[in-house]
Image (cartoon, rainbow, N blue to C red):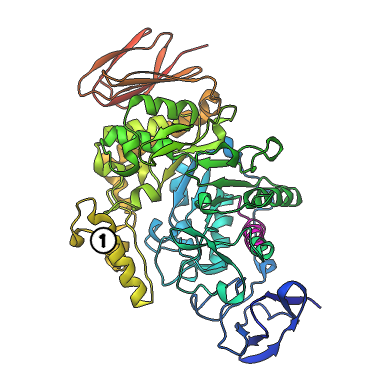
Amino acid sequence: MSRFSVWAPAARKVEIEIDGKLRPAAPSEGGYFTLDGPPPPGVDYRIVLDGGSGIVDPRSEHQPHGVHGPSRRVDHSAFSWTDAAWRPPPLSSGVVYELHVGTFSPEGTFDGAIQRLDHLVALGVTHVELMPVASFPGTRGWGYDGVSLYAPHEPYGGPEGLKRLVDACHARQLAVLLDVVYNHLGPDGNYLGRFGPYFNTGYSTPWGPAVNLDGSGSREVRRFFCDNAAMWLRDYHLDGLRLDAVHAFFDRSAEHFLEQLAREVSELETLLGRQLVLIAESDLNDPRVVRSREAGGFGIHAQWSDDLHHALHALLTGERVGYYGDFGSLEQLARALEQAFVYDGRYSAFRGRDHGKSPVGLSGHRFLGYAQTHDQIGNRAQGDRLGHLVAADGVKIAAALVLCSPFVPMLFQGEEYNAATPFQYFTDHQDPDLGRRVREGRRHEFEAFGWKPEQVPDPQARETFERSRLDFTELAVAEHRDVFEWYRALVALRRSRPDLSDGELRTSRVRFDEAARWLVLERARTSIAVNLAEHPQRIATPGATRVLLTSRPDLDFSPSSIVLPADAVAILDKGD
């Protein structure tokens, strides 16, 4: 008979309330309490600690009644998968598309997202990256305040809905990555602290005490997160995970948590017989994150590259507020395109210290490059996309540099057709006091940037969420369709030319003129020439034989140079 276990070292007595009836769990080694015969799948149950009220199982696989409701187990063998022959494409040859399930379709569900997958196939992307789907309070939100980390969000469609989406993606040759949040949990519905030392008050994060990765009891805390990762990859057939803000992991263990996670995922990969990937979000500019474990790194396969985003954004928009104050020159954009990290041990005025370390020796495949993400759009006061800040010509330039860069390119939903809809910060906290504090905190945050409180959208208002929903009817409008065709052509070009996707940083070189405001990215047989000036100008392109793509048709090309209109980009073939 299988056993049901709960780790609750902080409790003296543990009972499992199954369908309204209490069953005592026997204390076991290591702070565990066990029960012969687990709750049957689909049956409601709660965990009762020391005779108190029943609460959510930390490892609950289904929360059909929200983050405070009873838990359920899931029979993962019951789903009829059709992807037995599926093998994901390598991330190194991929084009990633980040999407938010709640705003990607009118339905805002996993099934609704399925109806939009053919659009992604037409675009040519290879990997779909889902923003977090673990259960969080209310019905709408970004998902970074999840609390039931093993249970897919019920308003999205719950466990069965997520499986249908993954199966449908695989049927269309789309790999699926999932954003997981292991650095903090939301406050509403977070019961972990009642069970044991899941948090370490000795470390502080922007969200409160850090997750306990190296203190007393940390072995089982680490087990909780590693088992969670394995569940998504094994039971939901996901092809990889994106790890949120790993710079908020505080761990002095001999084997860092990231290294342990990478090791265990590698073991699971061997067991499952298909490639699995881990992608980190990190602002440390520390190459150890993505160096192999054999070379003394943590063994994460790739990480987001914010320096490329910041360099592009600051140059195109002219913004210099906050961390953008560290960027804005063509020299910095060139460095980002050549080696990912602009700050590789250099002094950062924004941080007031030296920052980062050189990533020399690493492949471009270790980094994701992008011009827009949920963070960089949604964490603006009004959720402005790049297309709200610059003309479509600027959007096309950013797209060309990202999709022709030596990095794995990533797009954010709607970017591919220059969506007019914003992506704002929205929540649905059921605790009125928490909702009020989030609303006031958001307004106070942007007050320093000159925004009046009434100009900052209310995160709790449903209208804020509705404004952020994609409107795919915009694709019928010529200006949006034009941008979509540009993105589609760029994706196709990248996938057809080996030098654009080889990740080879040694052969990626950038020439530029800071004063004249032009730049040429050289990628072996391909040149990407950009004119950021307000007037046409001639740019030397020795060896170029023909124009492959251009954002503006009114150019003058010769084998040695090209005259580009203002705010234009051309991609050139240099031959053999």
- Which image quadrant is residue 150 in? bottom right
**Residue 502 percent location from the top left of the image:** 56, 27
Label 1 crowd (10 A; few <14 / some 14-19 / many >=20):
many
Q: Is residue 203 magenta?
A: no
**Residue 153 percent location from the top left of the image:** 50, 68
- The residue most toward the bottom is 21
**Residue 482 percent location from the top left of the image:** 30, 36
Q: Is residue 240 visible?
A: yes
5 shown above or below 326: below
- Which image quadrant is residue 160 in? bottom right
Q: Is residue 550 visible?
A: no
Q: Which residue is mark 1?
A: 443
Q: For the residue marked with disc 1, what is the amino acid?
A: Arg
The one nearer the camera, 294 or 375, is 294
The one nearer the camera, 201 or 393, is 201
| Residues rendered magenta in the picture | 224-239
**Residue 438 percent location from the top left of the image:** 33, 66
Q: How many marks?
A: 1
Residue located at (50% from left, 79% from top): 68
101 shown above or below 124: below
Instruction: Give the main secondary structure of the magenta stretch.
Output: helix
Q: Is residue 349 left or right of residue 200?
A: left
The one nearer the camera, 137 or 128, is 137
Q: Quadrant of the N terminus?
A: bottom right
Callout 1: SS: helix
- The residue most toward the right is 1
Residue located at (40% from left, 30% from top): 401
527 shown above or below 231: above
Q: Is residue 380 left or right of residue 307?
A: left
Residue located at (63% from left, 51% from top): 252
